[in-house]
Amino acid sequence: MLMEKTLKPLSECSFGDCFLIKEINIKGPLRRRLLDLGFVKEAEISVLRKSPLGDPVAYRVSNTTIALRHDESSMILGEIVRGNTK
Amino acid sequence: MRVNRIALAGNPNTGKSTLFNTLTGLKQHTGNWPGKTVVHAEGSFEHKGEQYILVDLPGTYSLFSNSADEEVARDYIIFDQPDATIVVLDATSLERNLNLALQVLEMTNNVIICINLIDEAEKKGIRIDEKRLARELGVPVVKISARNKKGINRLLDTLSQLVKGQIVTTPYRMKYSKEIEEAITKVESKLEGYFDEKYPSRWVALRLLDGDEELILKLQNHKNNKQHEVRTNGVPVSVKS
């Protein structure tokens, strides 16, 4: 399909971006945990800040700050809704 | 005299412990849950001549036993079967908090939803229709501010009515896909009469379908090997017979 937007991993978002989750490519207890923390489909995530070495990154998800490692955020796919125009 | 055992569940940072302290004051003692480095806080209070023991469960986002905290909270609700469970929610982030509430509603009928930090939410312009929420969830919903001691009396009155059986709850239960619902019915019918104690069969069936092996072992152990509670210095220590 031509019109379909390509999904990007959450890890590619930069500071200030707003991200809409479409897919979580993780299985098992970690998936469960992410769902419990609010990383569910259609949830809006914004990038709050990065640690000095760029990993982990702090995200805002339904009113709380959660930090994810690159391993996790690269498996969460979705669309960037509002980009931070530089 | 009958003492009502009440559990307090909720996400971290919802003011659960503030409510615990407000209700029990200095009549509390802390220790660890048997065999775990998870803090166990228990306190007592009286309301209109009735005795209550309040157990502050660890703050968790879920009850699927991803961690020792969640295991302790889940086991208390399932194995100790308190007379009522108060689920404390943060009024400013209900969406996140309702996840835990729905899980508790799947485990027990005797639930009160307690929406805390209500003044905080009002400041942010959040209005909560507790009557509608109560209708949809099928259990009482009370708005409070534990820090400013608002709504505490209403909470306690509701609690007293619930433990006396004057309130009949019809907790909201998630409906799953047809395939899963059929499997639940099948497992539930096999479970009937398997345990001496009354576990919530729908919940146990769901966990079995989820392949929660650790829980299966626990249920079997509990069946063969009931735990006795010995009180030493007021701190419960569990001893296997």
Image (cartoon, helix red, strand yellow):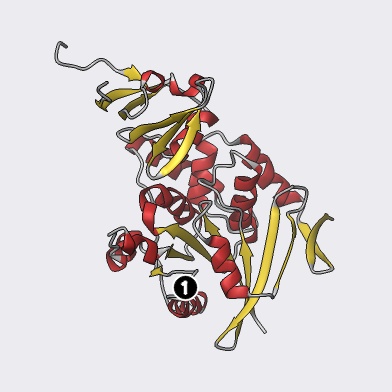
Q: Please say if B10 is above or below A60.
A: below
For the C terminus of chain B, the image quarter is: bottom right
Crowd rating for badge 1 (residues with CA inside 10 Å; few <14, some 14–19, many 20+): few
Secondary structure beneath label 1: loop
Residue B218 vs residue B96, the one in the foreground? B96
Residue appearing at x 67%, y 71% in the figure: B43
Judging by the rendered image, the residue that carries numbered circle 1 is B148
Residue appearing at x 49%, y 42% in the figure: B206
Whether residue B185 appears in this view of the structure is: yes
Q: Please say if B157 is above or below B80.
A: below
Counting from the top left corner in percent of width and height, residue B7 is at 58, 64
**Kind of residue sitting beneath label 1:** Asn
Counting from the top left corner in percent of width and height, residue B15 is at 51, 61
Counting from the top left corner in percent of width and height, residue B136 is at 30, 60
Residue A68 vs residue B76, the one in the foreground? A68
Give the farthest residue toward the front: A86
Residue appearing at x 65%, y 81% in the figure: B2
Specify whether B38 is left or right of B154. right
Residue appearing at x 50%, y 69% in the figure: B147
Residue B53 vs residue B106, the one in the foreground? B53
Q: Please say if B34 is above or below A6.
A: below
Instruction: Chain letter for mark 1, please.
Output: B
Q: Please say if B96 is above or below A85.
A: below
